[in-house]
Image (tube, rainbow, N blue to C red):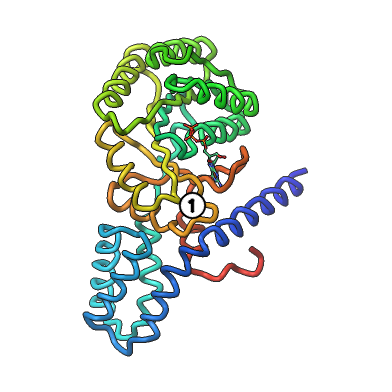
């Protein structure tokens, strides 16, 4: 049984990694082939070498901040280790990107605690799907999950969430279309406490064209949770669509102005050319990417694994993968 389970896990891992590799193929073509031609094209390390690297990293959607951090680190190590060969910089660069991406031990604390997770994101980024996937993942870890349909702006959002709740076998607390989202959160908190739920996942609207209202709405919901459920561990996750590249980064910045975001979920990482955006978001905002969406089914949400990400991006996949 254990062997079977391990074989299954192995298979899953393999599937995930090869999907990541193929998903990142365009990003890889962008960044890695450009990088490699610089390493091969320069006979020694000079200012032009650094400038060309800078251009490749920025064109690869890594963002200005991450690019500068990575190149500063490279310059320091080149000096420190007396490196002369451009090719010897490749591994330093890879390690530096990986370092930028590490989410740390405490990133998934909410999964193990009684918690309330606010999920924000604009229409169409995959927010509802992502909440469904996250509920499914927590349920399969044996957690009791309650979903709050606090995106009461559109009736369809609530219906879609209901389907996901059924699929994940999680209870859904909803409201009428147009009802007060804070009232839904109030009811959901009461239900979470009464049923001793582990995680309460709140689907909230994220209409960035009206920041003031959004901020007020989130504030109101947070006040209710603070007052009614002070013992709960809190998490606020912003869902962003990786295929939108720099727009996703811009959205993350704007969300960060209206809420204390504790993590990012990047959806649609399968098949995008803009995977470098994961590095940019982390570096520019200091907010970790905690999960990535790699498809449309309930199993297609993965914890972000910096090591796998960097390996999928820079290395040829190993034989067994
Ligand atoms: N390929 C792929 N598609 C995804 C992923 N996540 C979500 N989607 C798809 O993206 C589309 C939008 O997802 P929704 O969950 O409806 O998006 P939403 O942000 O809730 O948008 P509204 O419900 O319209 O507010 C759907 O067709 C999903 O199946 C992902 O990780 N990969």
The image quadrant of residue 211 is: top left
Residue 20 coordinates in the image, percent (x, y): 55, 57
In this rendering, the answer to whether 28 lies above or below 261 is: below
Question: Residue 161 placed where, x, y %?
Answer: 55, 25
The quarter of the image holding the N terminus is top right
Q: Is residue 156 toward the left or the right of residue 60 in the image?
A: right
Mark 1 vs ligand 1: CB below 8 Å: no
Residue 65 sits in quarter: bottom left
Query: What is the quadrant of residue 150 in the picture?
Result: top left
Q: Which residue is at a point 47% across and 44% down the rendered structure image?
A: 291
Residue that lies at the very extreme toward the bottom in this rendered image: 43
Q: Is residue 315 above or below residue 202?
A: below
Residue at 35%, 64% in the rendered image? 96
* Residue in the foreground of this view, choosing between 216 and 74: 216
Counting other residues with Cα less than 10 Å from the Cα at mark 1, is it few (<14), some (14-19), or many (20 or more)? some
Element under disc 1? loop
Residue that appears at 49% across and 38% down = 126
Asked if residue 76 lies left or right of residue 183, the reply is left
Quarter of the image with the C terminus in it? bottom right
Which x, y percent locates residue 273? 47, 59
How many numbered discs?
A: 1
Residue 42 horizontal/vertical position (percent): 33, 86
Q: Which residue in the structure is indicated by mark 1?
A: 305
Above or below residue 165? Residue 290 is below
What residue sits 41% from the left and 46% below the top?
A: 289
């Amino acid at each position: 049984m254990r062997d079977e389970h391990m074989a299954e896990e192995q298979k899953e891992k393999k599937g995930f990694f090869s999907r990541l590799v193929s998903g990142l193929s365009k990003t890889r073509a962008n960044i890695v082939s450009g990088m490699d031609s610089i390493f091969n094209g320069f006979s020694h390390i000079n200012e032009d070498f650094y400038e060309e690297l800078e251009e490749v990293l920025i064109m690869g959607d890594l963002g200005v901040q991450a690019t500068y951090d990575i190149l500063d680190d490279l310059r320091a190590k080149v000096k420190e280790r007396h490196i002369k060969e451009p090719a010897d910089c490749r591994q330093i660069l890879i390690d530096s990107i990986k370092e930028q991406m590490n989410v740390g031990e405490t990133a998934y604390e909410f999964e193990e605690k009684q918690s309330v997770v606010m999920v924000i994101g604009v229409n169409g980024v995959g927010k509802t799907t992502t909440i469904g996937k996250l509920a499914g993942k927590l349920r399969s870890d044996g957690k009791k999950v309650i979903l709050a349909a606090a995106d009461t702006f559109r009736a369809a959002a609530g219906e879609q969430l209901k389907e996901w709740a059924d699929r994940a076998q999680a209870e859904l607390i909803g409201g009428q279309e147009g009802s007060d989202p804070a009232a839904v959160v109030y009811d959901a908190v009461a239900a979470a406490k009464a049923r001793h739920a582990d995680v309460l996942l709140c689907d909230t609207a994220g209409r960035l064209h009206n920041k003031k209202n959004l901020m007020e709405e989130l504030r109101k919901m947070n006040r209710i949770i603070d007052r009614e459920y002070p013992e709960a561990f809190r998490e606020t996750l912003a869902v962003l669509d990786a295929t939108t590249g720099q727009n996703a980064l811009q959205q993350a910045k704007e969300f960060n102005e209206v809420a204390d975001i504790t993590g990012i979920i990047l959806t649609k990482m399968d098949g995008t050319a803009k995977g470098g955006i994961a590095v940019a978001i982390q570096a520019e905002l200091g907010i970790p990417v905690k999960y990535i969406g790699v498809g449309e089914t309930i199993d297609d949400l993965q914890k972000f694994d910096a090591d796998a990400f960097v390996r999928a991006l820079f290395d040829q996949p190993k034989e067994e993968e």
